[in-house]
Image (cartoon, rainbow, N blue to C red):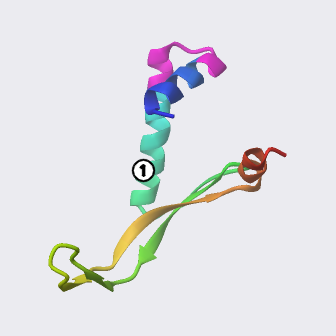
Amino acid sequence: MTKAELVDQVADRADLTKTEASRAVDAVLATVEDALRRGSEVTVAGFGKFHVSQRGARLGVNPRTGERIQIAATRVPRFTPGSGLKSAVKGR
């Protein structure tokens, strides 16, 4: 599903115009992004939790040259699905 398709479905389900739905979707995504940037978690009951995880430094291999390179530690976004979402995907 693309963002445009998501906006269309939000507009239909919430009885909004596409412009209003687009602004709402953009606001939700920006809010989640801002929270993660600050290191906070975003938990949506029954849906899941967005959080930031620390990925440690490690050795990698340059695929072109085969040379070993050091990959720096970094922060990465993660999503853990909630029980409601898991059940919906399983079809229960």
Magenta includes 75? Answer: no
x and y percentages locating residue 37 in the rendered image: 39, 58
x and y percentages locating residue 77 in the rendered image: 45, 61
- 47 to 9, vertically: above or below: below
- 78 to 73, vertically: above or below: above
Q: Which residues are magenta?
A: 12-22
By secondary structure, the bulk of the magenta-drawn segment is best described as: helix
The residue at the point 45 percent across, 58 percent down is 36
x and y percentages locating residue 79 in the rendered image: 56, 59
- 46 to 75, vertically: above or below: above
Q: Nearer the viewer, residue 22 or 92?
A: 92
- 83 to 89, vertically: above or below: below
Residue situated furthest right in the rendering: 92
In the rendered view, does 73 fall on the left or right side of 84? Answer: left
x and y percentages locating residue 43 in the rendered image: 62, 54
In the rendered view, does 85 fall on the left or right side of 29? Answer: right
Looking at the rendered structure, the number of numbered marks drawn on it comes to 1
| Residue that badge 1 annotates | 33
Q: Residues within 10 Å of mark 1 (few under 14, many from 20)?
A: some
The residue at the point 77 percent across, 49 percent down is 90
The residue at the point 23 percent across, 74 percent down is 63
Secondary structure of the residue carrying tag 1 is helix
